Amino acid sequence: MPEQPRQGYAVYREGETFRARGQVDQTEIGSSGRAWQTIQLAIDSLGDTGGEVALQSGRFPLTQPVRLRDNVWLHGSGRGTSLLVSGGEENVGLLCEGLEGAVVSDLALRPAEGGTALAGLVLDDCGDCRVRDVLCKRFAGYGVWVRNNSFLCEIRSCSLAGNAKANLYLSDLANAGRGGDYVPNLVANCTTYGGGTGIECHKTIVLNVIGCQVHQPGGFGYHCRDSSNSVLISGCRSFQVEKDAVRVESSHEINISSNVFCWHRGNGIVLKDVSWGAVNGNEVIDSGVRARDGSPMVGILLRSGVQGVQVVGNTVFNWGDQCPMQVGIREDDTCRSNLIAMNSINYCVQADIIAEGADSVVNGNVARREEAYQHMGRLPFPDFNRQRISRFIGE
């Protein structure tokens, strides 16, 4: 018998039936009334060498998770390919578990109507896997969840919207894994909007977050906690954040540089129990505008034992048609050995800098506290709300 051609598979919908056929010989390899079953058949038919599964445009209800295999590229036809994830709070749409070289791209994941699925896509203990140009929207937990010592993985150019706990969640990436110790992951050019926290890290070591934008999260913009060490946040932006723009807690070797964090109800950048790091070249704008509890807010806040951190070359200001912040940069008396230098601070009511830490150095900062440079000559700009973005998301 002639050798069968190596080929990928296309999966398409025909009425209520889902069919898979070879991309070379056009032979149908199976069909089912269950989308996940047909997609899984196509993935499994690629065998150990991997290959391509192309989902055509249409709606594909997933009543069980689709499990990828090593070196499989699962992609759709852009957002015209919509995977609808049903099931309860433990269910996910696409599951990559213990894989190498898997890629997911060019499709949309949403809960089925009335569904409460936990997450759109999960990378669990995966190495060198990619997620790109994927929309994950309105899940009860997370849009994309990267966990359990996944390494050398990349989340790029994804849109993550209205996911209740965090739009992107990276957790438990701090232990020795299959790829070794301290192996990096990359998040680049992603957009999150609505939902809970924008991007959250829990026990995540060696992560680069580059060129991302977070809009109107209900929690923090960027949140690093619980030994999320050696995390870089650079070239990113946040806008209209319900809590602090950036909060880093019990995490060390942090670099927050060349970002724009604008219009947040909480503080701008908060470091708590952080050792060694750099907060350099950021713009922190409109800190604490209309805080819901009326608490005074700070542009950059160091507290609870922060040590060995430089806060250098930042521009911290509120516009004149916003409420002034309380303090530009504040370091409490539990901190030590920090450098606060060459910052520009504008429009706060109590002090430009309060530095109470032992052996800390404050040098070369400039400030104007009494009134904003851009006093605007008008009443405060109307408060922001999330109604329009929630309608856009479909919440």
Image: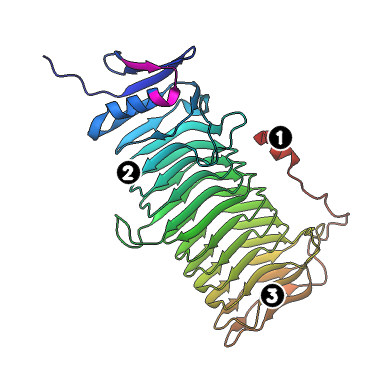
Name the N-terminal-most of marks 2 and 3. 2
Where is residue 13 drawn, in percent x and y?
45, 16
Quadrant placement of the C terminus: top right
* 160 drawn magenta: no
Q: Residues within 10 Å of mark 3 (few under 14, many from 20)?
A: some
The residue under label 2 is which amino acid type?
Leu
Q: In the drawing, what numbered circle is on residue 114?
A: none
Front residue of 354 and 13: 13
The residue under label 1 is which amino acid type?
Arg
Distance from Cα at disc 2 to Cα at disc 1? 37 Å
**Placement of 317 over or under 79, stated as above or below:** below
Secondary-structure class at tag 1: helix
Foreground label between 2 and 3? 2
Q: What residue is drawn where x is 50% and y is 25%?
A: 61
Q: Which residue bears the numbered disc 2?
A: 99
The residue under label 3 is which amino acid type?
Val
**Placement of 226 over or under 365, stated as above or below:** above
Q: Which residue bears the numbered disc 3?
A: 366
Q: Residues within 10 Å of mark 2 (few under 14, many from 20)?
A: many
Q: In the drawing, what numbered circle is on residue 391?
A: 1
Quadrant placement of the N terminus: top left
Foreground label between 2 and 1? 2
Distance from Cα at disc 2 to Cα at disc 3? 52 Å
Name the N-terminal-most of marks 1 and 3. 3
Foreground label between 1 and 3? 1
Secondary-structure class at tag 3: strand
Residues shaded magenta: 29-37
**Placement of 169 over or under 85, stated as above or below:** below
